[in-house]
Image (cartoon, rainbow, N blue to C red):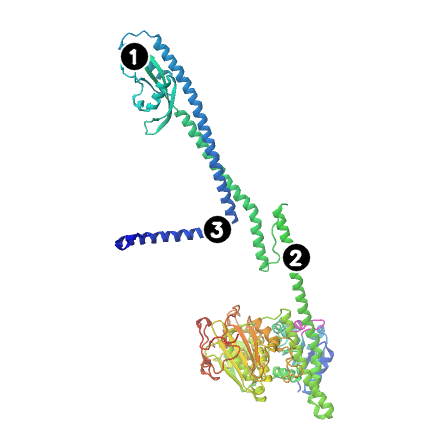
Amino acid sequence: MNARVLVVDDDAALSEMIGIVLQSENFEASFCADGAKAVDAFRTVEPDLVLLDLMLPGMDGIEICRRIRAESGVPIVMLTAKSDTTDVVKGLEAGADDYIAKPFKPTELVARIRARLRHGETQGTEQLLIADLAIDVPGHRVTRDSEAINLTPLEFDLIVALARKPWQVFSREVLLEQVWGYRHQADTRLVNVHVQRLRAKVEKDPENPEVVVTVRGVGYRAGTPVR
Amino acid sequence: MTDAAGGADPPPRADAFAGVRRRAERWRRLLRVRARLALLAWRRSLRLRVASTTVAVGVIALALLGLLLSAQIRDGLFDDRRDQVLADAATRADLAQQQFDASTVSSTQEVQQLATDMVAGLQETSAGSSGVFLMRSPNTPALILDPSTNDSLRPLISPELRERVQADHFQAWQSVAIPRSDGGVTPGIAVGSAVTLPLAGEYELYLIYSLGAEQQNLDLLQGVLTVGAVSLLVLLLAMAWYLTRQVLDPVQQAARTAERLAHGHLTERMQVRGDDELALLGRSFNEMAESLQHQIERLANLSLMQQRFVSDVSHELRTPLTTVRMASEVLYHARDEFTPVQARSAELLQTQLDRFEALLADLLEISRFDAGAATLEAEEADVREVVRRVVDLTAPLAANRGSELVMHLASSSCTADIDQRRVERVLRNLIVNAIEHGEGGPIDVLVGVDARVVDVVVRDHGIGMTAMEAEHVFDRFWRADPARARTLGGTGLGLAISLEDARLHGGDLEAWGSPGEGAAFRLSLPRRAGQSITTHPLALRPVRSDPNLEPPDDTSAANPAALPDLHPESPTSHEEVNG
């Protein structure tokens, strides 16, 4: 089954070109040019991934991102012309998983999409413990006292990467490679923002994190299992 | 200072002199310090100057006035009293003479009695008289004892006064000091007249009048004057203080406001009260601040517009460019199915798009610097690590051109507050540049450090450049040789951006070149943000075979990072040799 990608962009030429590239890579592409209709399109298409332009007529990309994230954990990749502005951080904070700065190459686009669609290889019945949380890796579930915590696939990948090697301190660069699939240097703000989002969901007190512990000047580490 | 017989002088004297000299020296030093402090305060404070000048002038004027006044009053009082005393004395002398003349005494006892009664009578009737004396003239035979009412005052009648009375046979006077019982003296006047006693003959009558009441009046008056003068002085001081305050407060306020304006508080204004000259100062000042604020805000607006424009251009250009880019990519990957002409066209399209993209990116980057929108994301990092990373990345390119990248890294930690992305970009630029112009020769990458600065020098041994060219390499779109093509896809903005990156760190980027010898670029970064660069651990023109430099693969790279301040002398620091 081919993965469905919803492309939300008001530039018809770019949308069509992205469609051509996606189809040549065996993705199924749907399009939406109007920000105001994007959320409806998302509901009808039920895509496996959303490519979202940040500057749109109708409703801006950040708001769309927030609305989609409110009802789904589906991967969202932003298309942005302004990689250096606060828009990127705002988009990430609104729930986008990753972003691609224009102009990009088709290979780059495809690599980003594939990285987001790739699901953690699940072998057997891997169970992990991190702080007071239990992670059922194949079941894609995180529980605290048998109460499930709802994480997006990216957040799940992030917590699993940390929990698999609780003795290791992960630098932001290593996390970018393991979780986002960047082989070269990338924007470490991705890690910062998503660690914050993850903490907001899993920490009892996000001000004093126990699950994802910051190691100053190095990166992050999994909290020691309680039990 | 010592006399001629110095050789014979015993040493203790010299010692004593030395001690005195030392003490004098100490005092002089102390005084000099005090004087300097006072002078400083004097120069610094207009208020102090005005107040002390006013007080000094006031003191002198009041002292002169007081002296003059009290002298006038004293003389007036004395003259009045003297005239009164002389008239009184004359009357009494006449009266006494008449009584003497009218008396009918026949014996020495009677004369004695008469004289004593007369003296006592005069003493009783004349006001303010301290003593009355009858004294025998020198030529008169001693018949009776000289009667007096107060024998203790007898020495006050001086021989000179007596001589004048005897010579004039009339009234003479002299100022005397009458001793008081408390040991002090009261001013007085002694008046003498010649009288003739029956039987006894020529005698002199002396009356001593006290000026105690006048003295008291004078004292009281002087006291009043002094009190008045002191109050006037205090008033003067207060006035001076108040007036200088009136004038200086607005000036001080202006200074404070100007300072705050200078610190960027553009809305700061002076308070203006009234309609006088000082209010004018305030108003003019505020007008100036207003116009300044207006100008600055206008410039800030322009800069903001520029930034927005750059951002818009960026977005508007990038979207179509992305489409073109992707289309070109699709064509490029399908070029095997094209005719040779079409295939070559697709290739050209592809490579030139790369160039176009790089150019656009560089243009946007430099306009960001121009707009002042570039921000430094500095964190502490070891520059050697960055250098290693860039060298690893560029080594394949160097190998392609037959060049070898040789690192000479300082053995001690080279941590600095740097924006790694920018420093990496600078170094990549410098190294790629060196590879392009290095003509296959080795390229040295040196890292040196001292307490304040980390230097990175990239040196090639290629065609080099002239000093004139070295001056221009950082100019935008500048080419040393217009005929020479850029082979590694440089945009012509790389070094200009690198220079901006270095300056954003508070550092610098310099170039040196010599035709045929190669070229060198030195990137200097302050180790702590805000520090200025005054020294250089590395020379721009590299010293050949420097013994202090370590071979490329030193094992000390794992040294724990230490505070730069703990390494005032790094092992690799040496003097700069170029001019």
First of labels 3, 2 by sequence position: 3
Query: Which amino acid, mark 3?
Result: Ala
| Along the viewing direction, whichever of B559 and B111 lies nearer the viewer | B111
Q: Nearer the viewer, mark 3 or mark 2?
A: 3
- Check if mark 1 and mark 2 are on a common chain: yes
Please tell me which of labels 1 and 2 falls first in the chain.
Answer: 1
Q: Earlier in the sequence, mark 1 or mark 3?
A: 3
Chain letter for the residue marked with disc 1 in the picture? B
Q: Nearer the viewer, residue B515 or A81?
A: B515
Instruction: Return the residue at label 1.
Output: B200
Residue picked out by circle 3? B41
The stretch of residues the image draws in magenta is: A54-66
Amino acid type for the residue under numbered disc 1: Ala
Cα distance between the residues tagged 3 and 2: 36 Å
Q: Is residue A181 visible?
A: no
- Compared to B103, does B481 lie above or below? below
Specify the amino acid type for callout 2.
Ser
Q: Nearer the viewer, residue A12 or B393?
A: B393
